[in-house]
């Protein structure tokens, strides 16, 4: 099966907000990414609105020619926003105000009672629910109990490790992907992926979508966003092929 690329545009908004201007425009970036072969756009509306804003979500919902994946914390505020905009997908992530980026996965096992109504309400609104989790059997089993149709496996640790430790983490990701897929859950992956480290993750056959942001926006500074997306696609396709 082909591997989809979701382009996370949060850091276009990070640059914009650093100067309080109305540029660079994340919606313009999303349209360029779509043109270059992105299969979807991901945006994380954080509680502190440090990058993507409510107005961005409104415009993305109205203007995107490809599916929007809204990353959101498991809160009533975010649930209401998701239900208002009805994105194609909603990925539930843990969120800590002081973190630089999403550290670790959501504890699907420990938070069952808080997540269950959220998953139910999003699914009832035809929004495809994904849980961003660590590649651990207990988390997959919890996702199954919650009835989540999709899990996104956190590849941050894989991206940071090297050598044998990285190989071990890659095995953990492969095992988690196999366990989830065997139970009928669609498997996505993301965090910390770059053109240089994406191949082993793209080669995991059960993984159907990668969500990538920081490295693409960084590469875009030097080669342009369209070229950065095309290079990532090529690296993913080569690994899959
Ligand atoms: N997937 C999820 C659930 C995320 O929270 C993030 C970061 O916002 C990403 C993917 C993309 O990670 P990166 O920016 O490191 O590529």
Image (cartoon, rainbow, N blue to C red):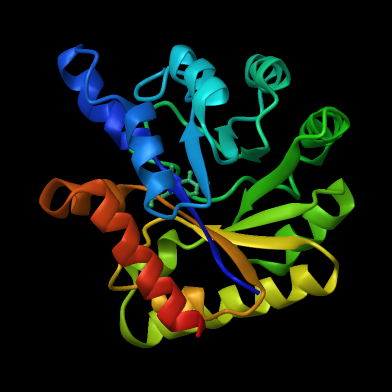
Residue placed at 40% from the left, 66% from the top?
233
Q: How many marks?
A: 0
Left or right: 65 as drawn, with respect to 121: left
Which of 154 and 198 lies nearest the eye of the viewer? 198
The answer to which quarter of the image holds residue 215 is bottom left
The answer to which quarter of the image holds residue 117 is top right
Left or right: 72 as drawn, with respect to 169: right
Residue located farthest toward the left when viewing the structure as drawn: 222
Residue placed at 37% from the left, 58% from the top?
192
Which of 34 and 216 lies nearest the eye of the viewer? 34
Q: Is residue 94 visible?
A: yes
Left or right: 212 as drawn, with respect to 42: left
Q: Where does residue 40 sit, x and y in percent of width and height?
A: 53, 46
Q: Where does residue 237 sit, x and y in percent of width and height?
A: 45, 75
The answer to which quarter of the image holds residue 111 is top right
Q: Where does residue 151 sit, x and y in percent of width and height?
A: 68, 55
Q: Where does residue 93 sit, x and y in percent of width and height?
A: 58, 40
Which of 43 and 22 lies nearest the eye of the viewer? 22
Q: Is residue 198 visible?
A: no
| Residue 126 vertical position relative to residue 190 in the rendered view, above or below | above
Which of 33 and 107 lies nearest the eye of the viewer? 33
Residue placed at 34% from the left, 73% from the top?
197
Q: Dividing the image into 4 quarters, which one contains the N terminus?
A: bottom right
């Amino acid at each position: 099966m082909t591997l989809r690329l979701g382009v996370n545009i949060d850091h276009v908004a990070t640059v914009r907000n650093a100067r309080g201007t109305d540029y660079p425009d994340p919606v313009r970036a999303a349209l360029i990414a779509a043109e270059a072969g992105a299969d979807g756009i991901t945006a994380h509306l954080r509680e502190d609105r440090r990058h993507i804003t409510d107005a961005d979500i409104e415009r993305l919902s109205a203007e995107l020619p490809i599916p929007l994946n809204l990353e959101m914390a498991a809160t009533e505020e975010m649930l209401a926003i998701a239900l208002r905009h009805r994105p194609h997908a909603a990925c539930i992530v843990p969120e800590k105000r002081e973190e630089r980026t999403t550290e670790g996965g959501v504890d699907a096992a420990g938070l069952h009672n808080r997540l269950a109504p959220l998953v139910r309400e999003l699914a009832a609104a035809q929004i495809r629910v994904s849980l961003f989790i660590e590649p651990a059997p207990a988390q997959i089993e919890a996702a199954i109990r919650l009835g989540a149709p999709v899990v996104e496996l956190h590849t941050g640790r894989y991206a940071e490790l090297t050598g044998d430790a990285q190989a071990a983490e890659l095995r953990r990701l492969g095992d988690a992907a196999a366990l989830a897929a065997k139970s009928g859950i669609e498997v996505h992956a993301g965090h910390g992926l770059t053109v240089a480290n994406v191949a082993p993750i793209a080669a995991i056959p059960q993984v159907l979508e990668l969500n990538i942001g920081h490295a693409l926006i960084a590469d875009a500074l030097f080669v342009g966003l369209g070229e950065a997306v095309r290079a990532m696609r090529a690296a993913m396709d080569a690994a899959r092929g």
